[in-house]
Every structure is written in structure tokens, then in C-alpha cells.
Image (cartoon, rainbow, N blue to C red):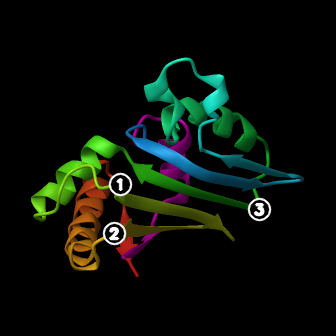
Amino acid sequence: MKAFKVVSVKEFMNKFLLENVFDNFLLVDLEIKKDISFSVNGEKNAAWFDNEEEKSGYVKWADVRPIASSLVKGSRAPLSIKAVLKLNDASTDKIVTECGGPAGQNAGLFLNISFENGVVTLTTGASLADFMIQKTVGNLWDTDMSIFLKQKEIAFEEL
């Protein structure tokens, strides 16, 4: 697990809410606090879908991003935004297999995004059944996230 403090909040929020920078992620949870609170559970409602493959898992961040962006728009910044994003399964399997683990083991690589008091903090997390592989995968995920942020020109300080 690694934590990062984003240097330019406005730039990050534009990339998070308006651009496709995080569109390869799935949304686990989103909470936006303004004059009222908005909460989104990213788990798909199976009854809504006809296709069996679409019924399970989490919604793509790309599908929710325009809604989240419209909720945040306004003359005042929200009191807080908290989002939990999960790396898509194909990318997660790639990282797990790079570390010697089996693909398709229901692993989770997460990015927690927190905006509060004008500060954005990003925290990585990994969840795997095998603790020994989890540590290796977690370390690689931390490194990959640092590289990802640099590639996307998101300035940060490690905490």
C-alpha cells in the first residue's frame, strides 16, 4: 500500500472527472458531499442486464464519470469526494501473473481517491487470497501506480 498527495488538485480533478485518464478502472464506490450527499454503489444490478457476462462485477468508471462530473459542477468545491476504483480484471490478471500467481483468482487492485479540505490523496490497495503473492503483487501495483501517474502527468508527493 502506498499513499500519494496530488500536487495540483484542479488538474487532477479535470483528469479524474472530465478526461478518460481513469476509464480503464471500475467503480466500486463513490461518495460526493455538497449541500447534500450523493452515494453510488458501483456493483451492477444483475436484474438490469440480459447478458450473463454483464450481470456481475462493477460498472466502468467511464460510464459513471459524466454523472459524477455533473454532480461536482458548481461555483463551490464539494466538501469531499471519496472514490474507490478497481483495476479491470484483464489488467489485474496481467500483474498477478507477472508475480507468479494464477490468473482469474478474483484478485483486486484498488485506488482510493480522497478529496477533503482542498487536498487530494490517492492510496493503493491489493486484495488476494494468497498472502505471499499479495505482498509481491501489492508492491508491483504500487510501482505501476507511480508510473501511471507520471505517464498521465499527475504531479504527486509520496506520503
Which x, y percent locates residue 155?
36, 61
Q: Tell me the residue that label 2 is attached to.
A: 129
Amino acid carrying label 1: it is Asn
Residue at image coords 67%, 68%: 116
Instruction: Say which of 22 and 131 sits in front.
Output: 131
Task: Identify the element where label 2 is drawn.
Answer: loop
Q: Is residue 14 left or right of residue 1?
A: right
Amino acid carrying label 3: it is Leu
Instruction: Say which of 24 and 127 sits in front.
Output: 127
Residue 11 sits inside the magenta stretch = yes
Task: Identify the element where label 3 is drawn.
Answer: loop
Amino acid carrying label 2: it is Ala
Among numbered discs 1 and 3, the one appearing first in the sequence: 3
Q: For residue 48, which quarter of the picture?
A: top right
Q: Which residues are magenta?
A: 1-21
Numbered badge on residue 106: 1
Q: Tell me the residue that label 3 is attached to.
A: 79
**Mark 1 and mark 2: span between their CA atoms?**
8 Å
Check contact, mark 1 vs mark 2: CB within 8 A: yes
**Dividing the image into 4 quarters, which one contains the N terminus?**
bottom left
